Image: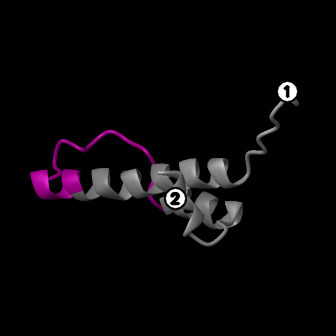
Amino acid sequence: MSDRIRKLPDLSRDLIDVLDARFPLRLPDINDSEREIWLKVGQRKVIEFLKDTYDEQHTTLISPKV
């Protein structure tokens, strides 16, 4: 997965926050169709992927000298 993440441009925390607010994690509504539920699940999967990618892009790995 690291190779795929390196190919992405640096992500903005502001962009992720706006998308997270636009597509919040919430339980399905009783009136939602199955299609709407899967659409919302897909939206959240993208947000979670972007958050994970951002975290990986901004994590500094410090390896001890051997």
Locate residue 41 relative to residue 44 in the image: left or right: left
Locate residue 34 relative to residue 61 in the image: left or right: left
Locate residue 26 relative to residue 59 in the image: left or right: left
Counting from the top left corner in percent of width and height, residue 63 is at: 80, 34
Which residue corresponds to mark 2? 3
Main SS of residues in magenta:
loop
Nearer-the-camera pick, 8 or 43: 8
Q: Residue furthest left?
A: 34
Position of 58 relative to 66 (above/below): below
Dot 1 falls on a residue whose secondary structure is: loop
Counting from the top left corner in percent of width and height, residue 32 is at: 17, 51
Which residue corresponds to mark 1? 66
Residue ID at (48%, 61%) = 4
Q: Residue furthest front?
A: 66
Query: In the rendered structure, which segment of residues is drawn in magenta?
Result: 22-38
Residue ID at (64%, 66%) = 11
- Amino acid at pointer 1: Val
Picture quadrant of residue 17: bottom right
Dot 2 falls on a residue whose secondary structure is: helix
Callout 2 crowding tier (Cα within 10 Å): few <14, some 14–19, many ≥20: few
- Amino acid at pointer 2: Asp
Q: How many marks?
A: 2
Judged by depth in the image, the label closer to the viewer, 1 or 2, is 1
